[in-house]
Image (cartoon, rainbow, N blue to C red):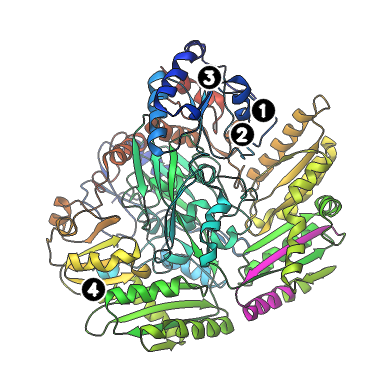
Amino acid sequence: MIRPESEAELAETVAASDGPLRIVGGGTRPVGRPVTGAALSTAGLAGIALYEPGALTIVAEAGTPLSEVRTTLEAEGQRLPFEPMDHRGLMNTDGTPTIGGVAAANVSGPRRIQTGACRDSLIGVRFVDGRGEIISNGGRVMKNVTGYDLVKLMAGSYGTLGVLTRLSFKVLPVPESQATLTVEGLSDTEAVRAMAAGLSSPFEVNGAAHLPGDAPRTLLRIEGFASSVAYRAGELVRLLERFGPVTVERDPQACAETWQGIRDVAPFHNRAGDVWRVSVKPSDGPAIAARAGGAALFDWGGGLVWLLVPAGTDLRARLGAFEGHATLIRADAATRAAADVFQPEPAPLSRIAAGLRGQFDPRGILNPGLMG
Amino acid sequence: MDMPAPNVEVLSYRARIVERLRGALPADAVIDDPTETRAYECDGLVAYRCPPLAAVLPRSTEEVAAVLRICHEEGVPVVPRGAGTSLAGGALPTADSVILGVARMTEVLETDYDNRFIHVQTGRTNLSVTGAVEEDGFFYAPDPSSQLACAIAGNIAMNSGGAHCLKYGVTTNNLLGVTMVLMDGTITQIGGAHLDAGGLDLLGLICGSEGQLGVVTEAWLRILPKPEGARPVLMAFDSSEVAGQCVSDIIKAGVLPVAIEFMDRPCIRACEAHAHAGYPDCEALLIVEVEGSADEIDEQLGLIKQIAAKHEPVELRESGSEEESARIWLGRKSAFGAMGQINDYMCLDGTIPVSELPHVLRRIGEMSKTYGLDVANVFHAGDGNMHPLILFDANTPGELEKCEAFGAEILKLCVEVGGCLTGEHGVGVEKRDLMSAQFSDADIEAQLRVKDVFDPAWLLNPAKVFPLAATETRRAAP
């Protein structure tokens, strides 16, 4: 494993490389087509470079463990707004998730529907492109329209355009209180309607998930000052009662565990099969799950559908044409090598994507083929 | 500020270009009469003007595609234009360019409350997007000051912000998808009613690309349920430094106001003279607005007042009614108009880390003395997005140049303390030549390579965003 200890050393390594490189953060998210190449680790680039609680910004080296970022923020009562998923349980991996990996895969959890995705909180990047050049874009201020937004482009590019070296994030205060409202026994379609009712209310729902099965549960989360949460919980109970009896959980530990389970897709842990992640408009969620067969979990008010299907299932054939995108998250290497892991794009967009790869990585050495 | 010399070859076959455009569009959609093209000679950056070769006002995505196809074949530069409110010269034409205005494309194509989005043509104004959904209890969050006039197309091109983005984010955080026409006339859709991209985040790349990568004709925008209520508090301090510290403490305390606006003494005085909002005469004034139910608002404002008390405000005025709220906002909202009454002014848009606020304000004050030009500061303090207004007299020879030099120095200061040249207005032509203060050659080259992919012939809004010298060979390529 090649392990540069500085950004400059990383740049030299990439520039001097005469073959493909497989970029490794914490190694906890083996998403994409398997890559053959020399392993290049970002673990040597670690540490919090800057943290200004009063400005709601943190800057960290890409190899910094996510847990270190979390602990640093917690000490000041702040957090990453986008609630990044921990893939280890779902993917059966160990290792230490890094902040660079989170950004490279644009990993976002339930709160994405309110505070945005990882890419929305990411306000600056530094990276080494496939030519071995160090490139900076964005910065450490949350309003910045200077030049093209390569920050967004790098988020979710899985190391195929450059190796991330340093990231700046906008962070938010941790609210003092939270509540989880549960309605039981709803069908997928009713559940999406109930979640839409909550999300269309002024009561700032920032989690909306549905767990189907023998005892289906539909969950809404609110956060804020204690008295405000109490008030909004009351209003939401009234709003949701037409769907069925509503229970309210106020215990912080219980709430945290519930939403961590949704974030990490806990119902699929230790169950055999391929796992797909589908993003559609929420009202299309139930039909997508029905077409897929297998088990489903709905987040983002129904707009994010996690699907567990028998290994090797050709999900794209089952889904047919639909508005949105499906990504194969978990499957064995052979399946991933043969499948379109990422949603095939219309011709003009795939031409643009290929063009961008050609510009950022003209030799095709950074995670080649990972995104297809 | 220089613009490239027009391509004489393009000018020489102007008649053929206009004829081809007329062949593709309805008669009233092509404007080439010199008295009429003058309406398109500038945008909100009025110091620079140049009538275009022609202006076209298509009504559909297909018509936009037809225009671009012709211009691509003829090698004619195209300058996309929303409502022309850019303060950065983003829509400034050159004599050899065709202005492509989307002002006639204003339709709402779909409103979907269950999925909380609206699908519009991009010539629609920002405020009328909210107008289309507010009776049903929804709104579109980004709210640039020009929202009455500015178009969604321009909002997307510049990634516009507004006063309330501390809570709701800027355009890019509220944009779900676009229909875009590439320079060669190819129509494509990126994103849609769903969240996030399947492959590379091209939507994020398009937003804020200043009309250089494609022409966005339709957009899917996220709409949000309106809060139950909102109420501001006005706080006056006897130093900018203390006001800046108060902002930082509010943020650290875990309150997340929807807006924190800051005005300094010159600005307060001008607004007072113009709008009579009843502002106290003080060094620095904060307007902090929070949202929620009546009780939630009380609680948050209570906490904010407690924090402010530690900084000994000279006055603290909490709104008790809709009318009082309107009065508190009145002065702030009329700030630019008020300054315009006094003088010509140049509005800057740099962003700085909030912690640098006192230092930067002090330095601007010192520079103001050196240059002999007054500055008024009004800005979004919560996110560090400053709007220094430099006052000058356009009729005094040399004063515009002096003002520009002063502005450049302020923006360089913003970069020096860890900020950036522009927080929400865009680079346009105004800050084009300052880009190298913020970016290395490699940083700029990486961005130019992106344009190479979308627009290899460099015909879309080509003389903007980057220093002319950096793009010269690309623009000159056949």
Chain letter for mark 3, please. B
**In this rendering, position of residue A22 left or right of residue B382:** left
Crowding at mark 3 (Cα within 10 Å: few <14, some 14-19, many 20+): many
**Residue A106 sits in which quadrant?**
bottom left
Mark 3 vs 1, N-terminal side: 1
Crowding at mark 4 (Cα within 10 Å: few <14, some 14-19, many 20+): many
Q: Height in image: B273 above or below A296?
A: above
Give the extent of the magenta segment: B282-305
Q: Which amino acid does the dot numbered 3 rest on?
A: Asp
**Residue hosting label 2:** B89
One can see residue A7 in this view: no
Q: CA distance from mark 2 to mark 3?
A: 17 Å
Q: CA distance from mark 3 to mark 1?
A: 16 Å
Q: Which amino acid does the dot numbered 2 rest on?
A: Gly
Q: Which amino acid does the dot numbered 4 rest on?
A: Phe
**Residue hosting label 3:** B96
Q: Nearer the viewer, mark 4 or mark 1?
A: 1
**Residue hosting label 4:** A268
Which residue is drawn at the image coordinates 81% and 42% (left, top)?
A: B341
Q: Nearer the viewer, mark 2 or mark 3?
A: 3
Q: Are marks 2 and 1 on the same chain?
A: yes
Which residue is drawn at the image coordinates 51% and 61% (left, top)?
A: B133
